[in-house]
């Protein structure tokens, strides 16, 4: 199926929309509410395009491709409409990039930049929202919300926690938690899905505020160290200071599709903790002293051998951790069964 | 059947109830009793006459005298003078030449033919004037597809505002194989200045039920909903009574007239959101969700309420159906104009001698409606503008008064028929104030789903408010047109698309009013 986009022919997949086709081919059409995970919403109206043979403008996020379709996303008529639509979104809140954590990582900013909007034409915001800092890890600043509905969709349809929805109507529409409770007292479990999917600086990571701009961090992909699901993480690392700033889920990961739980997303403070063990400790005369790995392992091996000799293999049992990988667990049970010679081996996930 | 010398029809509607009609009615009955006239004079309750600002009114037959603005103390005079001595109490009579000429000229009426004549809470009166004949004809003589074809052939167009052909709408849903289909009647009459559906439901609820059943039979729906606005207490009551009676008479329910067709009608009460008059928002609200529109396609005809095929029609559209079936599509095609058949009910407000409601053929000129049905301008003032189609309508100046009122003719003037609301303004009215109030309304009623509407309306309001307060500049007018035009092109539903029409027509036709505020 061939679709002509801005005068060029593209091979389209039958199930896709015009916006998906454009994005897949590296053509930017401003969009604020569409996200591949939450799907089409047609709420922000920034993705309007012109289609030959159809009067008026159409939102490309919910416009299915048709063979031979001729679409323009760059005509003056389209850009003018997009400019006004994004201008209105920009006028609706306190979208001042200077003080915003999401500066450089904001889809509204991207759209405004693409359309050449320097500052909003109107001033609609009248500062009547208080920042919701009530929860442990997430800050909600509704003055930056553009009511795109991604968090609502993600909370209800993706992670199915069913905490967030829209309250009020018209310009006063805002996201609410349960029956308009502060996030901290609502039934929110702080999974942070809404935070990750928010296109602007409305729902943000509380602990990373002021730690630096998004582009300053190295993004390292890894596997979550907590449970055996093996969610993929994108760790934002501040190399200069040797610190982890925040953790996101990897969006296209087959295990977690961008989702994380509260531990995986926020439970990384142990990494730089003062109380973290960095060398083996050996207890002598009731006191721990630091030791080398070789010394410690040799000591454990000799103790195990002694016990096995004196009381038999079944006097020893092994309990593995869910935080290690399958391969490590496999090696561990091999060690207990073959080297120690007992079937007394188990795993903490059973507890 | 009992014969009476005289029949007194008392209009019971929201207006007369507020004016204390019940008290006056009981006084009248007591007085008639006292004079031993209860056996000769029959007092009946009917729907509204279609006039407003006339308080408690009653019509005496066979003389066809309408008394209006009645107070408790007037009852004595009416009974003693009129009923005992046969002398009309002329000081209480509503402008008789006009009432005789137009209000009681029922020749042109289709949907309001019985309103003000029969007792809406008595099914036998409806049956007595030929009601439910169409329903019986449909069940006994017609196939569902024939009903759809008949309505298609009649050229009936939706009366909710968009003017989509009703028969065509039905023909999308009828062939779909589904376990459950629905007919939904849109009685969430929210367009400012529109109260036509209220009068239809208050005056002749059985006609609506009959239309619903015919529509349901045509598309194969076994369940219907009437989504009605919560403020319409009397309509809700009368519809409930009508549904109960129809069930008792076996006109509704299981195996109707042994035809094997089952039907059930339920009333759903709206919570007062303008946007819920939009069919998909109405369905969302009916399902118990936030009243915001859904994207189309799929259209409700394919996937509507609870994801089942659903026909959504306006009250007035449905109320036309029984007459079409009874008299045939050919008869309906003799009324109205090419491409727009039948009659239209208009609600007339503003600086008119006789504000209220009229039903007349499609294609009647606006001038005729204002001058003749509305009685002309009040207090000898000059006509300035008419806002046709409600808040989402267009300001028409004097030069456009001869426009024919039908979907196609109005389109030539970039105007819309909309719900049929006509707000007439005289020379003293400042268009800036009217536009300000319209935009304030849209700002308040925006549902908040899409960005252009929920943020565009506050922008428009700020601009018009600035102009109204004398702080505006001419550039603000251009900005209002620019913003509303983009809203018109990009908004999710008709609500956000609408402000463009009143804004553009007001600024184009009455620019001086705006400039005056800028001096």
Image (spheres, coloured by chain):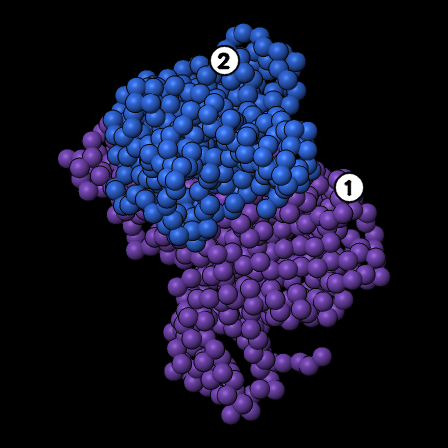
Is residue B488 visible to us here?
no
At mark 1, the secondary structure is loop
Q: Residue at x 39, y 19 (%)?
A: A218
Measured as percent of width and height from the top left, residue A227 is found at: 55, 36
| B57 horizontally vs A327: left or right | left
Q: Which mark is residue A26?
A: 2
Q: Toward which corner of the image does residue A31 lie, by quadrant?
A: top left
Q: Residue at x 38, y 82 (%)?
A: B73
Measured as percent of width and height from the top left, residue A139 is found at: 34, 40
Q: Residues within 10 Å of mark 1 (few under 14, many from 20)?
A: few
Q: Colour of chain B?
A: purple
Q: Disc 1 marks which residue?
A: B177
Foreground residue among A332 and B16: A332
Foreground residue among B458 and A221: A221
Count of labels in the image:
2
The chain ID associated with circle 1 is B
Q: Which mark is residue B322?
A: none
Foreground residue among B477 and A109: A109
Q: Look at the picture and state if A78 lies above or below B306.
A: above
At mark 2, the secondary structure is loop
Tag 1 and tag 2 share a subunit: no
Can you say which quadrant of the picture contains the N terminus of chain A? top right
Measured as percent of width and height from the top left, residue A147 is found at: 41, 38
| A171 horizontally vs B345: left or right | left
Q: Look at the picture and state if A285 lies above or below B476.
A: below
Cα distance in 3D space between marks 1 and 2: 42 Å
Is residue B252 visible to us here?
yes
Q: Which chain is blue?
A: A
Q: Residues within 10 Å of mark 2 (few under 14, many from 20)?
A: few
């Amino acid at each position: 199926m061939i679709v002509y986009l801005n005068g060029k022919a593209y091979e389209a997949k039958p199930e896709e929309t015009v916006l998906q086709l454009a994005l897949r081919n590296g053509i930017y059409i401003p969009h604020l509410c569409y996200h591949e995970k939450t799907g089409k919403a047609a709420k922000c109206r920034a993705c309007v395009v012109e289609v030959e043979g159809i009067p008026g403008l159409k939102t490309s996020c919910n416009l299915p491709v048709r063979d031979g379709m001729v679409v323009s996303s760059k005509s003056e008529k389209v850009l003018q409409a997009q400019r006004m639509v994004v201008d209105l979104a920009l006028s609706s809140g306190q979208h001042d990039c200077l003080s915003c954590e999401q500066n450089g990582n904001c889809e509204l900013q991207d759209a405004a930049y693409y359309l050449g909007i320097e500052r909003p034409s109107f001033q609609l915001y009248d500062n009547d929202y208080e920042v919701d800092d009530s929860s442990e890890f997430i800050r909600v600043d509704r003055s930056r919300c553009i009511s795109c509905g991604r968090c609502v969709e993600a909370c209800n349809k993706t992670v199915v926690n069913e905490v967030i929805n829209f309250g009020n109507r018209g310009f006063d529409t805002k996201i609410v938690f349960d029956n308009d409770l502060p996030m901290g007292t609502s039934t929110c479990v702080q999974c942070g899905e809404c935070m990750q999917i928010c296109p602007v600086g409305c729902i943000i990571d509380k602990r990373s505020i002021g730690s630096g701009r998004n582009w300053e961090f190295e993004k390292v992909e890894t596997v979550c160290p907590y449970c055996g699901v093996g969610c993929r993480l994108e760790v934002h690392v501040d190399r200069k200071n040797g610190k982890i700033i925040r953790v996101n889920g990897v969006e296209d990961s087959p295990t977690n599709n961008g989702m994380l739980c509260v531990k995986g997303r926020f439970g990384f403070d142990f990494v730089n903790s003062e109380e973290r063990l960095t060398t083996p400790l050996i207890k002598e005369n009731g006191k721990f002293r630091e030791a080398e790995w070789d010394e410690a392992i040799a000591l454990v091996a000799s103790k195990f051998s002694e016990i096995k000799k004196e009381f038999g293999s079944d006097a020893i049992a092994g309990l593995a951790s869910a935080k290690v990988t399958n391969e490590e667990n496999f090696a561990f049970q091999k060690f207990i069964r073959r080297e120690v010679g007992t079937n007394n081996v188990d795993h903490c996930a059973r507890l | 059947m009992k014969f009476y010398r005289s029949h007194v029809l008392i209009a019971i509607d929201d207006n007369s109830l507020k004016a204390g009609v019940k008290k006056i009615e009981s006084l009248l009955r007591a007085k008639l009793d006292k004079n031993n006239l209860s056996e000769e004079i029959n007092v009946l309750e009917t729907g509204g006459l279609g006039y407003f600002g006339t308080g408690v009114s009653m019509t005496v037959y066979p003389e066809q005298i309408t008394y209006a603005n009645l107070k408790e103390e007037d009852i004595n005079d009416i009974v003693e003078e009129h009923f005992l001595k046969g002398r009309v109490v002329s000081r209480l009579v509503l402008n008789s030449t006009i009432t005789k000429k137009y209000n009681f000229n029922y020749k042109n009426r289709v949907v309001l033919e019985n309103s003000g004549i029969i007792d809406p809470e008595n099914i036998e009166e409806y049956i007595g004037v030929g009601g439910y004949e169409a329903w019986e004809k449909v069940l006994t003589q017609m196939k569902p597809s024939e009903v759809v074809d008949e309505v298609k052939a009649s050229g009936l167009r939706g009366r909710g505002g968009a003017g989509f052909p009703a028969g065509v709408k039905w023909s999308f849903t009828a062939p779909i194989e589904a376990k459950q289909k629905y007919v939904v009647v849109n009685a969430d009459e929210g367009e400012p200045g529109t109260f036509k559906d209220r009068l239809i439901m208050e005056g002749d609820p059985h006609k609506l039920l009959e239309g619903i059943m015919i529509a349901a039979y045509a598309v194969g729906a076994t369940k219907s909903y009437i989504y009605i606005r919560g403020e319409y207490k009397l309509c809700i009551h009368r519809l409930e009574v009508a549904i109960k009676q129809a069930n008792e008479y076996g006109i509704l329910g299981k195996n109707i007239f042994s035809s094997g067709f089952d039907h059930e009608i339920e009333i759903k009460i709206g919570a007062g959101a303008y946007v819920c008059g939009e069919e998909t928002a109405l369905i969302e609200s009916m399902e118990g969700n936030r009243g915001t529109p859904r994207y189309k396609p799929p259209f409700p005809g394919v996937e509507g309420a609870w994801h089942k095929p659903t026909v959504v029609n306006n009250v007035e559209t449905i109320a036309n159906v029984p007459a079409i079936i009874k008299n045939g599509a050919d008869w309906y095609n003799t009324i109205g104009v090419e491409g727009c058949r039948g009659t239209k009910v208009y609600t007339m407000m503003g600086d008119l001698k006789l504000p209220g409601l009229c039903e007349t053929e499609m294609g009647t000129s606006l001038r005729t409606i204002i001058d003749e049905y509305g009685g002309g301008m009040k207090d000898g003032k000059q006509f300035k503008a008419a806002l046709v189609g409600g808040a989402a309508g267009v300001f028409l100046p004097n030069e456009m008064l001869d426009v024919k009122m039908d979907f196609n003719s109005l389109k030539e003037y970039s105007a819309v028929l909309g719900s049929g609301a006509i707000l007439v303004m005289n020379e003293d009215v400042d268009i800036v104030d009217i536009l300000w109030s319209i935009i304030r309304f849209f700002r308040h009623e925006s549902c908040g789903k899409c960005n252009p509407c929920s943020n565009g309306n506050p922008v428009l309001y700020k601009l018009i408010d600035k102009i109204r307060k004398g702080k505006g500049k001419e550039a603000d007018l251009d900005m209002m047109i620019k913003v509303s035009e983009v809203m018109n092109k990009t908004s999710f539903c008709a609500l956000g698309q609408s402000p463009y029409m009143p804004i553009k027509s007001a600024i184009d036709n009455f620019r001086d009013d705006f400039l005056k505020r800028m001096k």
